[in-house]
Image (cartoon, grey):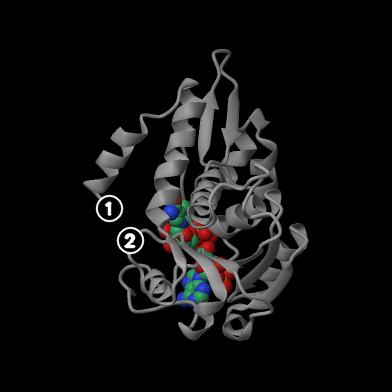
């Protein structure tokens, strides 16, 4: 099989024989497995990588969930952005029982995604004044703050104090302004590099049927990011 990235994640769907049900809902794939009979099965491992990193971040702060369920269940989960990564995070968090809010520069795209996950939509400008409750989870999937515009951030520092955990999908740079400010506000932070590496673990498993050599992956990643 093979991996598939921007700009092929959506169009490649048309060439598949079988598509994982969540990948079908997200309408984007990044991992294609070629079976011995030549048929192609597609997965989206982006959402698994990001959501498992966020769950582990929350578990680290609260201890293990005694009921064994996801620590995202019942949380208000605010997704900034409605592109490929935004869809992965919104569907992934919804699947874990979170309540979803999508905030995007282009409101129509936020609305379309929010409607699909039974959530609320708003523009990116509105998110600074949105704090209906404390302890929310924030996931930035916009490219705001990505190299070379490293001084940009998608949300004010003031607004970050209402969030328990802040995740940034951006991994260039690893330490974005958003994550630095979230840390200063006392939030748990989850790096985009964690999503990147964990989605790779899933691809390895799909390709080989074996667990990924996680330490080796981490060592290789530390040399490059
Ligand atoms: N860590 C990982 O493994 C991983 C995996 C995938 C992606 N990513 C990262 O996630 C980010 C988004 O990737 P993607 O594939 O989702 O891209 P995409 O499909 O092109 O979506 C880009 C999103 O960013 C928003 N945006 C772009 N420029 C903006 C600006 N100047 N102000 C406000 N919003 C802006 C877009 O809003 P509009 O709808 O208004 O255009 C859209 O919601 C990138 O930084 C990428 O590197 C990380």
SS state under label 2: loop
Any part of residue 92 in sight: yes
| Residue displayed at 29% across by 44% down | 221
Q: Position of residue 145 (x, y in %)?
A: 39, 72
Q: Residues within 10 Å of mark 1 (few under 14, many from 20)?
A: few
Between the residue at mark 1 and the residue at mark 2, the CA separation in whole angstroms equals 7 Å
Q: Which residue is mark 1?
A: 225
Q: Which residue is mark 2?
A: 174
Left/right placement of residue 176 relative to residue 12 reads left
| Residue displayed at 58% across by 60% down | 86
Judging depth in this view, the residue of 130 and 145 nearest the camera is 130
- 1 or 2: tag closer to the N-terminus: 2
Q: Position of residue 179 (x, y in %)?
A: 40, 69
| Residue displayed at 45% across by 50% down | 195
Answer whether labels 1 and 2 touch (C-beta < 8 Å).
yes
Q: Residues within 10 Å of mark 2 (few under 14, many from 20)?
A: some
Q: Position of residue 188 (x, y in %)?
A: 46, 64
């Amino acid at each position: 099989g093979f991996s598939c990235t921007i700009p092929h994640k959506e169009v490649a769907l048309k060439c598949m024989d079988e598509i994982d049900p969540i990948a079908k809902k997200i309408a984007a794939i990044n991992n294609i497995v070629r079976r011995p009979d030549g048929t192609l099965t597609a997965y989206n491992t982006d959402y698994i990588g990001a959501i498992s990193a966020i769950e582990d971040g929350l578990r680290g702060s609260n201890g293990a969930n005694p009921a064994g369920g996801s620590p995202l269940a019942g949380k208000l989960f605010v997704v900034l952005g409605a592109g490929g990564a935004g869809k992965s995070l919104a569907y992934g968090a919804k699947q874990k029982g979170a309540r979803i809010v999508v905030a995007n520069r282009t409101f129509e795209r936020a609305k379309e995604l929010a409607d699909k996950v039974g959530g609320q939509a708003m523009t990116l400008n509105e998110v600074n004044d949105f704090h209906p409750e404390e302890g929310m989870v924030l996931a930035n999937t916009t490219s705001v703050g990505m190299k070379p515009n490293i001084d940009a951030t998608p949300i004010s520092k003031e607004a970050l104090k209402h969030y328990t955990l802040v995740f940034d999908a951006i991994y260039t740079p690893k330490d974005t302004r958003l994550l630095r400010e979230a840390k200063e506000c006392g939030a748990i932070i989850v790096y985009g590099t964690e999503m990147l590496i964990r989605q790779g673990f899933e691809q390895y498993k799909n390709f080989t049927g074996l667990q990924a050599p996680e330490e080796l992956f981490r060592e290789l990643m530390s040399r490059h990011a």
